[in-house]
């Protein structure tokens, strides 16, 4: 069991900034995110795109913003449970919460802050009628263990970076790799596209384009795929695995069943005070919450995170006096023993 | 020339909405759909309008001269589902006076 002061669900910009604000109040945070890396949408969807409305940054790339937020909160030593989706929440008799992920990892804290944005990113499944019955029986939407494909026949579908990168990687592992895409053009880093071309020329990857997977054939597991090339009759290709890589889309997911008030796919909060939900001790901050006048902006998430931490402090330290401190005056004392502070003014006599 | 144009949007439940869309607010079709709340929040414009998610895919039913498809839109549509010959990403269609009378249908959520 992982114990902390604030469990933050979602490691996007709002969640990461909450770690810093909590740290100033000597509260420790642990973040849970379905994605394998922190940054949320900023790292998953648009790391190379600029953002122009972060105060004091006339322009910053979304990926760089993530890096800077990680650097800013580093001394408060946040814990991370990545690649796991928060599945259930259970209130304990002592008022604390236990959040359990889909992989069974348990986290306990007196305060939970949901900073889940538009939701957890789930793979987009192609529209093949019987695909669900083959999930984990030869159909995998996410590659977790590349060794699974050693000396197997693998078909990958998709035209983006992940389809290209995994085709390249698995070319050395699998018995055969076939890449199927609806167009002849691929949308990926130039290096990856060129590498795939090279592997195709040396017959390490077979390319079938423009084509789509239109059916899955097999008894207990995937045995073959029906592939249809544009304007041609379908044909069958034997394979052990089918890996559709069509990107991820965010879904509110299990949080919808936590007893929270939901409106317009977002969690209702009290914005007059502290962004608490209808369940005391559970807050919602950032793009995933809703209140009158809500704007889904990163800078609004930062503000909400800051106020949430004040309320969390009161829950964790009931009745304890607190006064706002400015970092310029008080400095920043990290949990790792580091201290940042403004340089002292030099006093020198003038004769 | 008037500032608003009349356009018709058929939502994902098949309901037809005749609306007036402003041409002077630098809006795109995805943003018009959101501003009139014709699709639930969180199911459209997920990437914010960068042609990176296809949640605003729509079918263009009228014969308008639309802005030409750029590479990123074409690439995104080639990975999207429920794609038809008249599919476009709403976020890439800028609302301009030439689009008076436009009729589009929102593609299913995926």
Image (cartoon, coloured by chain):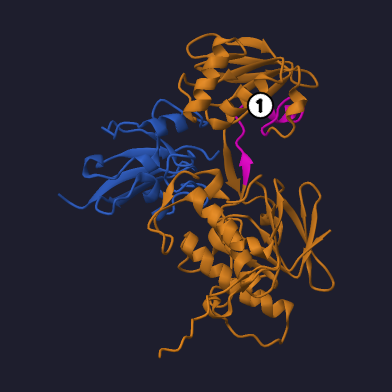
| A338 left or right, relative to A2 | left
Q: Nearer the viewer, residue B50 or B96?
A: B50
Residue drawn 54% across the image and 15% down it: A198
Residue A303 seen: yes
Seen in the picture, residue A71 relative to A6 is either above or below; the reply is above
Quarter where residue A222 is shown: top right
In the image, farthest residue toward the front: A351
| A184 left or right, relative to B96 | right
Badge 1 density bin: few <14, some 14–19, many ≥20, Cα 10 Å: some
| B105 left or right, relative to A265 | left
Residue drawn 59% across the image and 19% down it: A179
Q: Can you say which quadrant of the picture contains the C terminus of chain A? A: bottom left
Query: Measured from the top left, where is residue B102 in percent x and y?
Result: 30, 39
Query: Measured from the top left, where is residue A273 in percent x and y?
Result: 57, 78
Residue drawn 57% across the image and 42% down it: A249
Residue B40 seen: no
Query: Measured from the top left, where is residue A203 in percent x and y?
Result: 60, 10
Quarter where residue A92 is shown: bottom right
Residue carrying label 1: A243
Magenta residue span: A121-142
User: Which chain letter goes with mark 1?
Assistant: A
Secondary-structure class at tag 1:
strand
In reply to whether residue A138 is colored magenta, the answer given is yes
Q: Nearer the viewer, residue A76 or A308?
A: A76
Q: Nearer the viewer, residue A311 or A328?
A: A328
Image chain in blue = B
- Rendered hue of chain A is orange
């Amino acid at each position: 069991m992982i114990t902390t002061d604030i469990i933050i669900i979602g490691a996007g910009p709002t969640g990461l900034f909450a770690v810093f604000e909590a740290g100033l109040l000597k509260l420790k945070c642990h973040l849970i995110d379905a994605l394998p890396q922190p940054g949320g949408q900023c790292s998953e969807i648009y790391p190379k795109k600029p953002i122009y409305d972060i105060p004091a940054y006339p322009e910053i790339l979304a990926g760089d913003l993530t890096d800077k937020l990680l650097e800013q909160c580093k001394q408060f030593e946040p814990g991370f449970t990545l690649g796991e989706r928060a599945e259930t929440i259970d209130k304990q008799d002592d008022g604390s919460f236990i959040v359990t992920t889909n992989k069974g990892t348990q986290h306990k804290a007196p305060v939970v802050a949901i900073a889940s944005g538009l939701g957890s990113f789930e793979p987009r499944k192609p529209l093949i009628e019987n695909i669900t019955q083959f999930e984990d029986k030869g159909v995998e939407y996410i590659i977790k263990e590349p060794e699974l494909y050693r000396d197997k026949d693998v078909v990958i579908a998709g035209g983006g970076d992940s389809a290209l990168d995994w085709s390249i990687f698995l070319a050395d592992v699998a018995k055969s790799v076939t890449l199927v895409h609806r167009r002849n053009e691929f949308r990926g880093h130039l290096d990856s596209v060129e590498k795939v071309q090279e592997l195709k020329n040396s017959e390490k990857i077979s390319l079938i384009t423009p084509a789509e997977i239109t059916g899955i054939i097999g008894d207990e597991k995937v045995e073959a795929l029906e592939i249809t090339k544009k304007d041609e009759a379908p044909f069958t290709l034997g394979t052990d695995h089918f890996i559709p890589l069509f990107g991820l889309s965010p879904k509110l997911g299990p949080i919808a069943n936590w007893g929270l008030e939901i409106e317009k796919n977002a969690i209702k909060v009290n914005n007059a005070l502290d962004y608490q939900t209808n369940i005391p001790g559970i807050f919602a901050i950032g793009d995933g919450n809703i209140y009158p006048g809500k704007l889904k902006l990163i800078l609004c998430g930062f503000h909400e995170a800051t106020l949430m931490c004040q309320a969390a402090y009161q829950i964790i330290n009931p009745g304890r006096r607190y006064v706002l401190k400015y970092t310029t005056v008080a400095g920043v004392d990290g949990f790792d023993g580091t201290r940042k502070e403004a340089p002292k003014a030099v006093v020198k006599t003038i004769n | 020339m008037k500032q608003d144009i009349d356009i018709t949007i058929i939502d994902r439940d098949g309901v037809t909405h005749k609306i007036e869309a402003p041409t002077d607010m630098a809006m795109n079709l995805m943003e018009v759909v959101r501003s009139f709340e014709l699709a639930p929040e969180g199911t459209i414009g997920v990437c914010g309008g960068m042609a990176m998610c296809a949640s605003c895919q729509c079918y263009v039913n009228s014969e308008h001269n639309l802005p030409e498809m750029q590479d990123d839109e074409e690439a995104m549509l080639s990975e999207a589902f429920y794609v038809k010959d008249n599919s476009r990403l709403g976020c890439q269609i800028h609302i301009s006076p030439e689009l008076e009378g436009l009729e589009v249908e929102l593609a299913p959520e995926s």
